[in-house]
Image (spheres, rainbow, N blue to C red):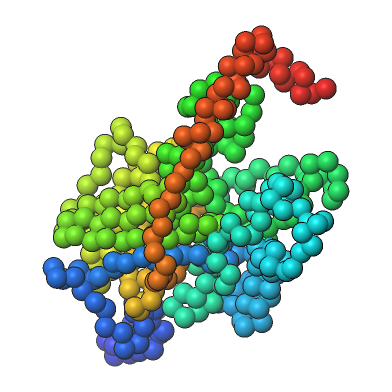
Amino acid sequence: MTCTRSSLFASVAGMAMMLATAPALAQSAPGYAIPHTSWGAPDLQGTWSNASITDMQRSPDYPNLVMTPEEVRKMEGSDYYNNRTREDAKPTDLKTAKLLDGSDLLSGGGYNAFWVDQGTRVALVRGEPRSSWIVEPANGRIPRKVAPAAPAPRPAPGAPGAPTGAPSRTGTVQGPGAVDRNAGGGFGSYDGPETRPIGERCLIGFGNTGGPVMTNVLYNNHYQIVQAPDHVAIVIEMVHDARIIPIVKDAAAARHGSGVIKPWLGDSVGWYEGDTLVVETRNVNPVQRGYISKDGKLTERFSRWSDDQIVYEFTVDDPTQYTQPWKGEMALNYSKEPFYEYACHEGNYAMEGILAGARKQEKEGKTVARNAEEEGR
């Protein structure tokens, strides 16, 4: 095959035309002027929320990233907690109603839907209703190397131990880098505080709200962003976790620790690329929940879309966990709600009772093996 000078010019011209006509992903809404701090950085400060019924992974019921109006109505109308809220709001006969008796604890409602604040709407990202936060792969699913273990069989409705309801959310909060779900509840797990889950100990937020990746959960979905010339702080409502991110000149100047110390929420370094804050996180503590392992890397991008929204983009790159890097886009919406105090009392009060139970069993001469044998009867 030969290529003349004229044909090469035509090919380059044609490619340039295709690139010029290809749809570009706008960084901000049309006509929006991004505000800046006094030192010239894009101003991301304020209180924001990612509360939404949109989840990390896409349900097979909604095959496309951008949803139709009919799909939006279907998802919002069938959402478990939306329906629970409507049912709880109905008048009840106080003579026969069972109020705050714990009968619905297994439904995930925490007594009733009053305590749940997950959001009621499908997320709008750049004005588009989204069926998942994940945008790549195209199917909206996490490309795990090893499929997660199948859940234990659910008891038949009405059988002992059967839950009274089932949330419709796809439940992707538990990331692959997390500890085993049963690690804090099996026999012998009450011997000391180190054997209890870190959320129960109030060390960091349960549900992966602080990252990596920052994820929406059933309540406490607020984030407060504060900027200074050399740092950015992101305060998370759940357990008041705080990400303190040093700001460097550019990606070439980013430096992480040796990895000997793996902090909660990871070792993050940030820089600005135009009007976007870029944050790179490594060295995540392997005990915490999250979507990257101790060897993975998370890249986050925060861009102001409008006065009312920051688009939070993330790329998860962890060959030990996934067959390919995967990406997502999340809406952080401006919140007029104040940033309430969050008081985590599990570690203050529950721990004493949990460990006291273990000491009582020891005094009675019970052992892990004996307890397991009694449980099997």
In-front residue for pair 345/288: 345
Residue 93 sits in quarter: bottom right
Give the image location of residue 246, x and y in percent.
Answer: 22, 52
Q: Is residue 183 left or right of residue 347?
A: right
The image shows residue 230, relative to residue 11, as above or below, that is above
Name the quadrant of the C terminus: top right
The image shows residue 250, relative to residue 295, as above or below, that is below
The image shows residue 358, relative to residue 90, as above or below, that is above
Give the image location of residue 44, x and y in percent.
Answer: 29, 68
Name the quadrant of the N terminus: bottom left
Give the image location of residue 237, x and y in percent.
Answer: 42, 54
The answer to whether one can see residue 318 in this image is no
The answer to whether one can see residue 77 in this image is yes
In-front residue for pair 67/87: 87
Task: Kindly identify the residue that appears in the image at 72 percent across and 20 percent down.
Answer: 372
Give the image location of residue 231, x and y in percent.
Answer: 21, 55
Q: Is residue 27 left or right of residue 61?
A: left
Q: Is residue 170 left or right of residue 252?
A: right
The image shows residue 352, relative to residue 299, as above or below, that is above
In-front residue for pair 160/328: 160
In-front residue for pair 223/360: 360
